[in-house]
Image: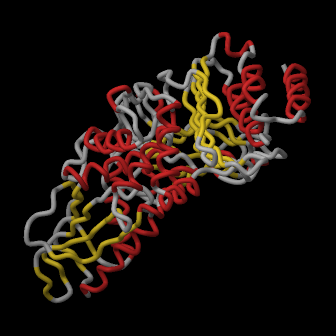
Amino acid sequence: MLKKLIIIATLWNVVILAQVTGDNLGRKLDSLTSSSFFDTAAISIDVFDLTAQKSVYQKNNKLLLHPASNLKVLTTSTALLFLDKDFAFETSLYYDGTIIDSTLYGNLYFVGGCDPDFTTADLQVLISSIKNLEINRIDGNIYGDVSMLDSLFWGNGWMWNDDPSTDFPYFTPLTINDNAVKVHVQATDIGNAPKVIVEPATSFFKIDNLAKTENTGRTSLEVTRDFVQRRNDIIVKGIINPKDAVYSDEINVVYPEKYFLTLAKEEIEKLGISFIGDVSISPLPEGTKHLFTFRRKFTDVINNLNKQSDNLSAEMTLRALAFKYYGKPATPENGIRLVDSLISLAGMDPRNYRIVDGSGVSHYNLVSTELLNADLKYFYSSQPELYNTLAQSFPIAGVDGTLKRRMKGTLAENNVRAKTGTISGVASLSGFLTTKNNHQLSFSMMIQNHVRKTYRAVYFLDRICELLAELE
């Protein structure tokens, strides 16, 4: 197989060195996409010259395919267009009752606003505002208000057996640490169980440590949780070799709102404030007093969303759209109504496509490269300021994000700005690049129905970008 790939790469280098012009580009792309790889896999391509305002190349561009994370192009475009310029996700703290002799006879309320990037450090900032109350005891309860969302914790068509991967986070308005936990396993004495540490440190998880420290063989550990019963019981099994010292992994958290509130309780106690009440879920009642709101602008979220292809950020963004225009509870269906509005503005008919989530995780999603490129063309031509924000949020080939290791040593490196997409049997890429003759191109490409050959699909996507960058 390696020999075959070397031969393919060598032949491709011969092709790419030849001058690429508007007259022969189509033939070169047709030749590339006539590979036997596409005897069983489908490919769709739509390329447009934004400078000359004309189509460059199209192949199966109306074909409906699963976009994977290329759907985030539509989600983030919609958010840039329909959320206010200064829109911010908010996580707020309220209290009720009275304060007598340094004791709060009342309750604290944490109100979630779907901030996808909220962390333990942000929680500490929020909780530090309690110092303003000058209390050292809370004679009441801690509540979490999660009424901003409906009760659905995953997207339509998400698969149960992808749990507990962090790519499939559980949804809640009270998000924290990507609704995930880091697990570190440290070697101990030979024959003994290793030490298991969760980050951040918390009593929220039960640890079932079945692993051993062994000085023979390579480290082979599995870190998971009881996802079948949807419990936060972390299970560690396998062996760790002392030469590896520390093994780290990350898994998602079920009931992340309870995780948030447990961390909040523990941070409150670290401030020296005693608390013996309950921690539970309840909507914010009338008459409460506002203490502090932590705000994060969407423009501070979009870069991580697109560059790292963050599914939680995309889903929370879709629900932020729904909340702004349709109120509580924010549903994905209402968010998709705004996506449909963008599709119409881009000159396409939303009835021709199927969109069910904001991240592209679901195999139910069906769109075309024609649609995705129409969105990119619309932003370039009609929303120049927003176009810059969108394009800058995409990974840069050979530089950062999910394209950091791709297209290095070619004219596409540090040139292509594009959103990647990968789920089982799907590889996609949509974005912008500049040709050798200094024309700006927008493009969308999707490959589907390949089996255990993601690296091959990615190979063709990258080669197409390199060929387009050579255009003169």
Q: Is residue 455 above or below residue 471?
A: above
Which residue corresponds to the image point at 35% horizontal and 71% vertical from the top-left? 294
Q: Is residue 69 above or below residue 115?
A: above
| Left or right placement of residue 439 versus residue 172 in this view | right
Quadrant for the C terminus in the image: top right
Which residue corresponds to the image point at 53% horizontal and 38% vertical from the top-left? 373
Where is residue 257? Give x, y as percent: 31, 52
* Residue 316 visible here: yes
Q: Nearer the viewer, residue 157 or 84?
A: 84
Q: Nearer the viewer, residue 129 or 87?
A: 87
Q: Quadrant of residue 465?
A: top right
Where is residue 110? Give x, y as percent: 26, 64
Where is residue 167? Give x, y as percent: 50, 40
Which residue corresponds to the image point at 54% horizontal and 25% vertical from the top-left? 61
| Left or right placement of residue 425 versus residue 404 in this view | left
* Residue 195 visible here: no
Quadrant for the N terminus in the image: top right
- Identity of the residue furthest to the top in this view: 39
Q: Is residue 364 above or below residue 206?
A: above
Q: Quadrant of residue 142?
A: bottom left
What colour scheme has been applied to the protein in the rendered image? secondary structure
Q: Is residue 287 above or below residue 8?
A: below
| Left or right placement of residue 275 versus residue 387 in this view | left
- In this rendering, the count of numbered labels is 0
Q: Nearer the viewer, residue 47 or 71?
A: 47
Where is residue 371? Give x, y as percent: 47, 34
